[in-house]
Image (spheres, rainbow, N blue to C red):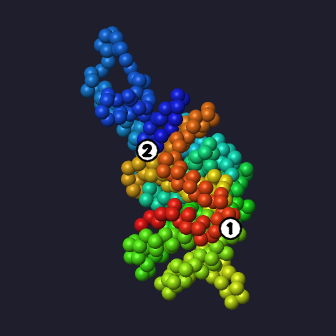
Amino acid sequence: MEFVKSAKGNNLLVYKGFLYSREKPPKNEKTIWKCVESKNFCQDITPGVSSVLPSISSLKRNVRRYRVCLETSPSNPSSLENLIIPEKFLLTVDKKPFMLYDSGKEDSQRLLIFSTKINLELLATCDHWYADGTFSSSPQLFSQIYTVHGAKFSTCIPLVYALLPDKTQTTYTKFLTALKALNSSLKPSTLMIDFEQAVQKSVNEVFPECLVRGCFFYFPQSIWRHIQSSSLQQRFMNDAEFALEIRQLAALAFIPKEAVEKSFKTLIESEFYENNEPELAPLLNYFEDTWLGRLNRRGRRRSPLFPLSMWNCFTNVTADLPRSNNGVEGWHNTLYSLLHAAHPSIWKVINAFQKDENLTRVKIEGFIQGKENVSQKKRYKLLNARIETICSKFQETPTLDYLRGIAHNLQFNV
């Protein structure tokens, strides 16, 4: 569930692709949400008309029959080669072309892309993109649903939906190449993804000028997973001061890129890290190998698994850009609520895409009219404000105080 603003600035509830307005409840009673189209039904039928209508039971049967016709979809295809998509799934709700790319039934790694001409034109105006995949909601025969969202109107807007057969670099490259061919003006400045090397390499190949950023959520979680697999977990859970010191590793993401290596050196030479060196050595080795690069004999750092530019957040904070794909993750939760099941039929998935595209169009029109996006929760606003304040004082704050300040505002999802 989510909320959008009405023309009068009131909240409208979005649920399963439909809009609901809030009814003013009597005192101390539950809030009631009513469909905004609830008044669009026949009223005041005259006796003359009612006399020629079929019986109530016949009318009910006709309604059921009509609903079955609307909901009837082809059976699930047995293979990608046998997948034939009926016309009603090729178009948007308002009958515009929606399936813009199909790699073809001859392709054993078949992929489909859904969007609209207008959505791609809007995406071309977005400097910052956010992309993510979900596997639990993917239909049979496809490995994942992959979506691309554009940063516009102070929010993330879903603009491209794709069904991908796997998560290999070859598939991601084919997807991005096909997307670029649909609109040659697509040139993102940044693209935020999870820390997946296959996607990273594909973006570098198709959009070489694009800076790939990792979703910050996965950065501390990766550190936490390593802690879980080591002897540090019990102490981390039971010793608040120990946990705060460890979280300073994740706080390095909020150091200006050019100062990260020096700040890391300052951190590991601090009293806490030196006193606990034997216990922390495996964690620090992992951190260097994965995120910073291990020092070689010449004192130079080898290439890490993920480059510093991918996980550093300082620029995002100072430019007031999101540090994570939380908006995209929230969209996936909304999609799952539309589907009601894990691995539904392909027809349910495409229908969910159609509903979401229709709702997105309504939201975009509202933003164009000047309606405000529903603001983020107060606690997240306060958290972001605190981090921004700390980052703004980087030059005047001692490194260890700075890292400790950021670490106080970070949580591992333990």
Circle 2 sits in a helix, a strand or a loop, which is it?
Answer: loop
Label 1 SS: helix
Name above or below for residue 248 compared with residue 146: below
How far across and down, in percent of the image, does residue 349 sit? Answer: 46, 50
Drawn side of residue 65 relative to residue 312, left or right = left
Image position of 249 with respect to 214: above or below: below
Occupied quadrant, residue 211: bottom right
Q: Is residue 393 above or below residue 378?
A: below
Residue 331 rendering spot, x and y as whole percentages: 49, 50
Along the viewing direction, whichever of 325 and 101 lies nearer the viewer: 325
* Residue receiving disc 1: 257
Q: Residue 144: image x %, image y %? A: 50, 60
Label 1 crowding class (10 Å Cα cut-off): few <14, some 14-19, many 20+? some
Amino acid found under the numbered disc labelled 1: Lys
Residue 169 appearing in the image: no
- Residue nearest the viewer, comparing 134 with 214: 214
At 65% from the left and 60% from the top, the residue drawn is 393
Q: Position of residue 97 (x, y in %)?
A: 60, 42
Q: Tag 2: residue type?
A: Met
Quadrant including the C terminus: bottom left
Which residue is outermost to the bottom?
A: 297
Q: CA distance from mark 2 to mark 1?
A: 38 Å
Quarter holding residue 15: top left
- Is residue 364 visible in this depiction of the protein? yes
Judge left or right: residue 85 versus residue 182.
left
Q: Are marks 2 and 1 in contact (CB under 8 Å)?
A: no
Q: Which residue is mark 2?
A: 1
Q: Residue at x 52, y 61 (%)?
A: 409
- Residue at the location (59% across, 76% down)? 267
Mark sitting earlier along the chain (2/1):
2
Is 29 placed left or right of 189 in the picture? left
